Image (tube, helix red, strand yellow):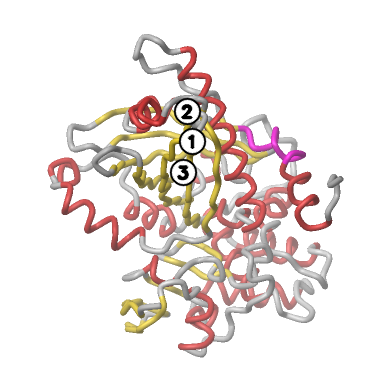
Amino acid sequence: MTDKTISLTVNGEPVELAVEARTSLADVLRGDLRLTGTHLGCEQGACGACTVLIDGVPARSCINSVAAFNGADIRTIEGMDDDPVMEELRQAFRQHHGLQCGFCTPGMLIMARDLVLRMPQATKGEIRLVMSGNLCRCTGYQGIVNAIHSVMQMHGGGSADAPQAPGTGPVGASHLSGKGDRTALAAAKREVPEALTEADDNASVEERSARRTEVELQLVPSVHHSFTLDFPRDQVAERFRDVPFMIACIPGARLKKAHDSGVFEVTLKASMGPISAEFAGLAEPEWNEDTTEGTIYGRGRDKRSATSARGEMAYELTATAAGATLVDVHIGYALSGALGQFARGAIVKQFVAVIVDQFAANFGRNMRDDGTGNTPPNSSELRMGRNIFKILKIMLTRHLGWGKD
């Protein structure tokens, strides 16, 4: 595979490297730069040991392709020796017995620092929920929670546990409205603008494509999915080019504004148990001449949790002998920020597969119901919890053979 030259700022020092496009950021940090404080545990985004800051936002480095972060500012545990909050956390972890073997500790400390700065009034219950994306096999977590809470109390925060009103929680807006380090929010805002800027709106297709290619390169993980629609390929291709129709088929998605430049402002609401998010961002489609192949690029952010998402969906439409249409979909994505801590690779892949199934069902229904050419109503909020048993069944069938004849 062809190497790509990328530039990074790592712990304040400029670095230029020639890397394979699919090399993970964790492998570059540990292997090329010898920053072995970034630990590799599961290498599937599940344990949090490899957590680093990417442009000020906590992210798993084992499932993020380094090529996707050309020009980014990376900060590892080695780059926080002089950080005052990190020093307080180190002392608190020692005093409250928040570490034993120490393997999870670098990722724990980085996430804890973000939590202290972003949610200084968090209760112990909220600390547990936010930190649940970082796994520890030794401590039982109580010492970790007490250590983080004690640092918050040193600065006048660390609220006592109390019943929460519905809709409030560790990613609620109320916890991001106070004083604190706004680095994560600023980084997310820089990555994905709240609204389409005039420069983007007036840029040529070629200019936008060049910028997007640089930013969206080699998103990981990727998901391949196929489904069949009982309509002729030309009819399906026409609808795939109808972006408002497509957006209306995505559960939880809503079109805010369509621009003459071919860019669309979109929101996506999703919830999973007590965690909810509303991503606001941009979508831009590209098609071949007969629209039987194309790619839809998207990027967005949830302001409440300072979580950024980027992705692309490439599709190919093939006519079947029965007069239907086979749709092959390839999806690549990257998720960083607070909600990225819950983005366990295998589970997210199954969620994406379930979402594609819902999209296919909505697409077919809307095709049948809409004989007027009007855009159908938007789908309801995406509630991932409704699909958890289906996802568990898929994973058990795949890995353990359960449910097979």
The residue sitting at the front extreme is: 321
Residue picked out by circle 2: 323
The answer to whether 137 appears left or right of 108 in the picture is: right
Q: Is residue 341 magenta?
A: no
- Image position of 374 with respect to 28: above or below: above
The answer to whether 140 appears left or right of 11 in the picture is: right
Locate the N terminus and report the quarter of the image it occupies: bottom left
Residue 67 in the image, given as x and y percentages of width and height: 39, 70
Residue 199 in the image, given as x and y percentages of width and height: 15, 46
Locate the C terminus and report the quarter of the image it occupies: top right
The reply to whether the C-beta atoms of the residues labelled 2 and 1 are less than 8 Å apart is yes
Residue picked out by circle 3: 302
C-alpha distance separating marks 1 and 3 = 40 Å
The residue sitting at the top extreme is: 372
* Earlier residue among tags 2 and 3: 3
- Name which residue type carries label 1: Thr
Q: Check disc 2 and report its element: helix, strand or loop.
A: loop
Residue 136 in the image, given as x and y percentages of width and height: 76, 68
The answer to whether 124 appears left or right of 270 in the picture is: right
- Image position of 145 with respect to 270: above or below: below
Instruction: Find the magenta span and give its range.
Output: 383-390
Residue that appears at 46% across and 72% down: 22
Residue that appears at 36% across and 78% down: 2
Q: Which tag is nearer the camera, tag 2 or tag 3?
A: 2
C-alpha distance separating marks 2 and 3 = 41 Å
Binning the other alpha carbons within 10 Å of mark 1 as few (below 14), some (14 to 19) or many (20 upward) gives some
Residue picked out by circle 1: 320
Which of 102/252 is in front?
252
Q: Quadrant of residue 341?
A: bottom right
Label the magenta part by its dominant secondary structure.
Answer: helix
- Image position of 376 with respect to 36: above or below: above
